[in-house]
């Protein structure tokens, strides 16, 4: 079966994007290790608008998938918009990668006075309890609720982005409800120990 020129360009384009992603992950990993964290450049940002971009991009890449965005409350704050786009895109991409085409993926943002909670729900991924303590460590558990990036760095980098903003990330996983990744991001003037 022969491929058309358009198909060849799509395959080449996806290969280039994968290599770019691998290089960026290695650079982020190196920065995080050498600098004791990722550098961020905070500026006023609306996380709701960033989430809309993530969902629009992923819907284009995964036509026909049920990808939902739910937002409530005040989603404005002072954060590094590019890094938080990367965080949400990685978590949504992981959920889409692992769930069957019939499953729904929900990106939910809830704003409160002291910060914002970002959740990505993947109803079809289960993280065994023995993996949950080391899920965000580098080079581990590549096949567990993380897209096959070939390195096992995506969840490590997501965690580093959350920590760089004074936030945190956790995972809840069970047989009945799949897996939720939950990120807490304090606002600029909120203490980093605040939580949902």
Image (spheres, rainbow, N blue to C red):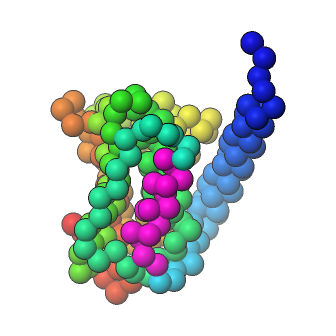
In percent of width and height, residue 26 lies at 67, 51
Figure quadrant of the N terminus: top right
Quick one: 78 or 36, which is closer to the camera? 78
Quick one: 39 or 60, which is closer to the camera? 60
Relative to 110, does residue 42 appear above or below in the rendering?
Answer: below
Relative to 31, is 113 on the left or the right? left
Identified at 63% across, 51% down, the residue is 25
Q: What secondary structure prevails in the magenta region?
A: helix
Quick one: 104 or 18, which is closer to the camera? 104
In this rendering, the count of numbered labels is 0
Residue 11 in which image quadrant: top right
The residue lying furthest to the right in this view is: 5
Relative to 65, is 16 on the left or the right? right
Identified at 51% across, 40% down, the residue is 62
The residue lying furthest to the bottom in this view is: 189
In percent of width and height, residue 148 lies at 56, 34
Q: Is residue 47 a member of the stretch shown in magenta?
A: yes
Figure quadrant of the C terminus: bottom left
The residue lying furthest to the top in this view is: 1
Relative to 196, is 67 on the left or the right? right
Quick one: 107 or 33, which is closer to the camera? 107
The residue lying furthest to the left in this view is: 176
Q: Is residue 156 a member of the stretch shown in magenta?
A: no
In percent of width and height, residue 3 lies at 77, 22
Look at the image and give the residue range highlighted in magenta: 45-59
In percent of width and height, residue 139 lies at 56, 40
Whether residue 137 is visible: no
Relative to 58, does residue 111 appear above or below in the rendering?
Answer: below
Relative to 104, is 2 on the left or the right? right
Whether residue 1 is visible: yes
Identified at 50% across, 40% down, the residue is 63
């Amino acid at each position: 079966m022969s491929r058309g020129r358009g198909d060849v360009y799509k395959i080449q384009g996806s290969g280039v994007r994968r290599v770019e992603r691998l290089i960026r992950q290695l650079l982020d990993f190196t920065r995080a290790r050498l600098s004791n964290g990722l550098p961020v450049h905070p500026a006023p940002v609306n996380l709701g608008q960033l989430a809309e971009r993530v969902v629009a991009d992923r819907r284009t890449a995964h036509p026909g998938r049920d990808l939902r965005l739910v937002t409530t409350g005040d989603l404005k704050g002072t954060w590094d918009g590019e890094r938080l786009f990367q965080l949400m895109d990685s978590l949504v991409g992981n959920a889409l990668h692992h769930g069957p085409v019939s499953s729904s993926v929900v990106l939910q943002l809830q704003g409160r006075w002291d910060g914002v909670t970002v959740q990505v729900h993947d109803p079809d991924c289960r993280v065994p309890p023995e993996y949950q303590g080391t899920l965000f460590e580098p080079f581990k558990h590549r096949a567990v609720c993380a897209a096959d990036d070939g390195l096992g760095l995506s969840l490590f980098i997501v965690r580093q982005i959350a920590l760089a903003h004074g936030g945190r990330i956790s995972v809840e996983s069970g047989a009945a409800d799949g897996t939720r990744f939950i990120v807490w991001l304090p606002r600029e003037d909120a203490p980093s120990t605040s939580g949902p």
